[in-house]
Image (spheres, grey):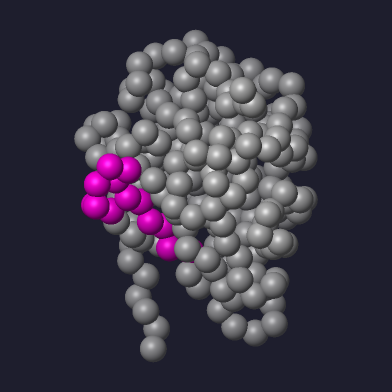
Amino acid sequence: MTTALLPPPFTAANQLDAALRERGHAVLAAAGLFAGLGAAPSALDGWLPYWDRLPPDAHLRDGGRYRQRRHGSFIVEGGTVRAVAHRAHWQPVEYNALHGGIERWFEPLEPGLVADVQWPRLLQWLAARASALRGAQPWFVEAHPFRIDTAGGIGRPTPEGAHRDGVDLVAVVLVSRRDVKGGETRVFDADGPHGLRFTMTDPWTTLLLDDARVIHETTPIQPIGGDEAGHRDTLVVTLRAGGFQGPP
């Protein structure tokens, strides 16, 4: 028996900032994202090959080989986007019990992706959402392209489980989803019992989270069938006020 996927509870683009303030989360359909970027629906098609070249994540503490990723850091201030020198990704154990407390060095973003005209537009648009939520200020941004595959049978988008990231705003953009089942997104109030679950299936669907108010996770994925591995590709962007996270 096939279980129907629960669709995302989409928010209208003109209600996005209000939804984030009121509920702490919002899901935007692809059309809303492209409207925010002022771009055509095909504007991000050129990004797809970058996910095919992601190197393995060498820091998985569960022994898995199902995740590939890169990492880049930026400062968005006053309408400008500035890349900073390549740095380690670090989270405290309070936010990531599995991988917290260690400096994780990942390969940097490919220059072609960062040079694409839509890249700074995306970061500026996300910074505007963060400023609408917290007030206008510089935003310290980390970008993580991920591929979770099912070559080993099961892939885990969030091996650390339900979590917060220790930032102000989290954006999860679905880039591609092929030949997999599972991968249900779950969002819960950080201080209460309420939550929701849904599955993002359409490319460029975008989930925005007020990290102070909600915790989130994505369930494991499995191949639909056959010998060919599937994958789930995302771009995760976090925005933090006051500076990047780093070792004390």
Quadrant in the picture for residue 96: top right
User: Which residue lies at the image location 47% right of the left edge and 63% below the top edge?
Assistant: 219
40 falls in the magenta region:
no
Residue 146 in view of the camera: yes
Q: In which quarter of the image is the C terminus?
A: top right
Residue farthest bottom in this picture: 1
User: Which residue lies at the image location 55% right of the left edge and 18% below the top edge?
Assistant: 243
User: Which residue lies at the image location 50% right of the left edge and 39% below the top edge?
Assistant: 94
187 falls in the magenta region:
yes
Q: What stretch is highlighted in magenta?
A: 183-195
Image position, residue 205 (x, y; %): 44, 50
Is 126 on the left or on the right of 50, as rendered?
Answer: left
Residue farthest top in this picture: 78
Quadrant in the picture for residue 225: bottom right
- Vertical position of residue 7 compared to residue 228: above or below: above
Image position, residue 167 (x, y; %): 47, 30
**Residue situated in front as seen by the camera: 63 or 89:** 63
- Vertical position of residue 205 compared to residue 38: above or below: below
**Residue situated in front as seen by the camera: 127 or 71:** 71
Q: In which quarter of the image is the N terminus?
A: bottom left
Is 139 on the left or on the right of 211, as rendered?
Answer: right
Residue 49 in view of the camera: no
Image position, residue 221 (x, y; %): 54, 68
User: Which residue lies at the image location 68% right of the left edge and 38% below the top edge?
Assistant: 102
Q: How many marks?
A: 0
Image position, residue 172 (x, y; %): 48, 45
